[in-house]
Amino acid sequence: MTVASTVDGDATWHNHGGIPIRNLWMLLVYAADLAGFLDRADADVDEETELPELLAILLATVVERRLRRSLSRGYRMTSAAPPRVRGRIDWLATESGSLLRRGLVACRFEELTNDTPRNRLVRAALERMATVVPKPELSRRCGALARTLATHGVGGKRPTRSEASKDQVARHETEDRLMVAVATMALDFLVPAEAAGDVHLTRLDRDERLLRRIFEKAVAGFYRHELAGSRRVRVQLGLSWDTAAPTPGLTALLPGMQADVVLEDGKRRTVIDTKFTGILTARPYGGESFKSPHLYQMYAYLRSQAGKGDAQADTAEGVLLHPSLDRDVDESVTIQGHRIRFTTVDLARSGADVRARLLEIAGA
């Protein structure tokens, strides 16, 4: 990913295929489900800012906001030998250690602590960012925040999935929800690019993967935020095949289906699939066409759910959404009762224009 130019002070990036993106900050905010809490003014972003730096700025901004108030605490089971009973007595440890002779008793009790899975996740993300971002000032900012968490008793080991699942963030814990969301996004976006098999990727290859995921998550986050209350928005919705008489090994081998975004308003269902590529491809003997695999995929999403007694599924519409490349495209066709729309959004335009276009695509 390279910076090509600036338009009205906004940096414009281009991916390998030449897709321009004017406002990565906006996409990141929607991708992290932070719309309504952060705006462009919160970030010190210029035309030289790289993707990891944007992630680091977003993470540092949210953590600094959280630290203005005390960190949330949780209960942790602790074993100790205090001079008086606290919690439940561990008689075996007390007797085997002859603790009573010394005026002590082994106990197990819950203790309030800042060392919770959510806080450890945030510290791990900050420490990772401090080693990834090239700008010394931003690296020091992330490192200092990580050390601040450490002084509050937060451990440095990233929590396991099991630990994280037990520390669910409640709806009213808005500040924690924001902090955990952006820390998870930062780690998820960076760590996969360094997994086995990816060690030889160039920075551009890694940025390409990040951009693809950011675009997908940003579209989903946008509709979750902007259509809340008026539409039911489901993200990464698993769809099942209408199978009959499968052979014993079929279930394990049949590929799954997962729609990026599904919008419903009680009367109409719209399945949106995002693709971070050009919407057209060259024909072997001249001319252009839509990409066959993308059309086949959408056709499968729609037709596999029809005929099951669900009126919305029988008339569901599909949208194949791509960023604009050389020109805007907006075409549609009805196939076996399902309207399928091939359309683009120009990410080189202002944030207001991008939002307006996405709302128009959703029919809002």
Image (cartoon, rainbow, N blue to C red):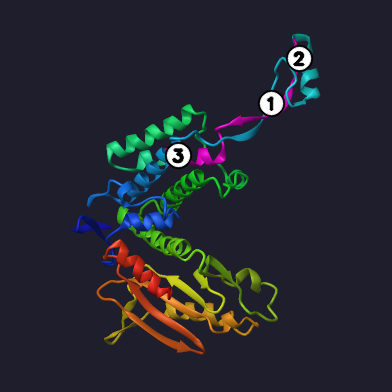
Instruction: Say if mark 3 contacts mark 1, CB within 8 Å.
Output: no
Mark nearer the N terminus (2 vs 1): 1
In the image, residue 123 lies in the stretch drawn in magenta: yes
Residue 99: which numbered mark, if any?
2
In percent of width and height, residue 124 lies at 46, 39
Give the residue at mark 3: 66
- Furthest-front residue in view? 229
Q: Residue at x 35, y 69 (%)?
A: 356
Q: Quarter of the image holding residue 286?
A: bottom left
Where is 313 relative to 211, above or below?
below
Q: Residue at x 76, y 16 (%)?
A: 97
In percent of width and height, residue 91 lies at 81, 23
For the record, the magenta segment spans 103-127
Please, what secondary structure does the residue beneath circle 1 have? Answer: strand
Task: Give the amino acid at mark 2.
Answer: Leu
Give the residue at mark 1: 79
Using residue 255 as the reference point, say whether residue 8 is left or right of it: left
Question: Could you give the CA–CA distance between mark 2 and mark 1, rounded to whole angstroms?
Answer: 14 Å
* Residue closer to the observer: 267 or 217: 267
Where is 17 relative to 99, above or below?
below
Instruction: Say if mark 2 contacts mark 1, CB within 8 Å.
Output: no
Using residue 150 as the reference point, say whether residue 210 is left or right of it: left
Using residue 54 as the reference point, say whether residue 107 is left or right of it: right
Where is 353 relative to 198, above or below?
below
Please, what secondary structure does the residue beneath circle 3 have? Answer: helix
Q: Quadrant of the C terminus?
A: bottom left
* Residue closer to the observer: 141 or 50: 141
